[in-house]
Image: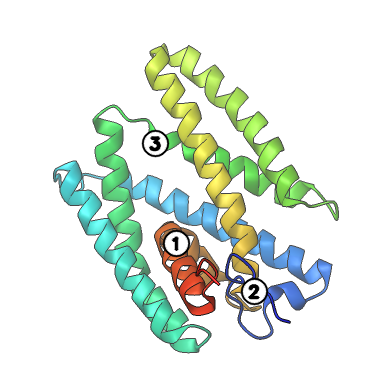
Amino acid sequence: MYVPNYIPAPLEVPHNVTQERYRVRLGFIRRVALLHLLSLLIVGGLSMLNLISVPVEASVLELALVLVALLIVRILMRGTKGDLLFSLALSPVLLLSVAILVRILNQTGWPVWGIGVGAGCATLYTLCCGRDFSFVGQFCLSLIASSVALAIVAIKLGMSTQDAAFLLGANAAYLFYLVYDSASLLARRRLGEELGAVIDLYRDVFNFFGYFVRVARHWRKHRIWARP
């Protein structure tokens, strides 16, 4: 008798990174971490330019539309070269949209720049851990190192308790998302798709909502909560 799981199995593509040797997987993780950090540096650089000024709501909506477009591309072309090509074509718009939002948030007193410190520590861990890499270790050690660094900066800048709490909280939340999603996307990407994985780290924010849809469909299909 087959008894289905209460939650759907994670999405996978054939010949994904999880099926490779440990050294190969680690190389993929390191390349993705470096490229993601590079993308954040590009976003940070763009956010310092005199970009267009729009309300926060409009900036969030613009970014959401770009992410939805990227999500549709992945849904329609998952596991194909078209996914990577179309995603890369939209990536400049994605980075510019993120930079505009970051600039606005920083100007309005929300210090989101702190997540770059956490991402930098996470990348540094992947480069220095040798063959002892683990996602749990990446999260814990990066969180400790980045929290200490940000706390020192907050004190030096004389930030209020509220701003400092947001700075540390945003960094912790982003680190958790970054590490969790980096682990998850190994089953959805193949070798040579590192750039696609970096874009996934941006558009996967919508996976939180899509996951509940998948769970609901899974329950309906297998009649898990149906009365006997």
Q: CA distance from mark 2 to mark 3?
A: 42 Å
Could you tell which of marks 2 and 3 lies nearer the N-terminus?
2
Query: Where does residue 185 sit, x and y in percent of width and height?
Result: 59, 66
Query: Where does residue 182 sit, x and y in percent of width and height?
Result: 60, 59
Q: CA distance from mark 1 to mark 2?
A: 17 Å
| Foreground residue among 29 and 207 | 207
Left or right of 50 in this view: 2: right
Q: Is residue 157 visible?
A: yes
Q: Identify which amino acid the numbered label 1 is placed on.
A: Phe
Q: Identify which amino acid the numbered label 2 is placed on.
A: Pro
Q: Quadrant of the C terminus?
A: bottom right
The residue lying at 69 percent from left, 84 percent from top is: 15
**Nearest to viewer (mark 3 / mark 1):** 1
**Nearest to viewer (mark 2 / mark 3):** 2
Left or right of 59 in this view: 83: right
Disc 2 marks which residue? 4
| Foreground residue among 101 and 137 | 137
Query: Where does residue 36 sit, x and y in percent of width and height?
Result: 53, 57
The residue lying at 44 percent from left, 82 percent from top is: 83
Q: Quadrant of the N terminus?
A: bottom right
Disc 3 marks which residue? 112
Residue 212: give its label: 1
Q: CA distance from mark 3 to mark 1?
A: 27 Å
Q: Is residue 56 above or below residue 191?
A: above
Tell me the element at label 3: helix
Residue 143 occupies quadrant: top right
Q: Identify which amino acid the numbered label 3 is placed on.
A: Val
Tell me the element at label 2: loop
Q: Is residue 159 visible?
A: no
Residue 162: give its label: none
Could you tell which of marks 1 and 2 lies nearer the N-terminus?
2
Residue neighbourhood size for the residue with mark 1, other residues' Cα within 10 Å, grouped as few (<14), some (14–19), many (≥20): few
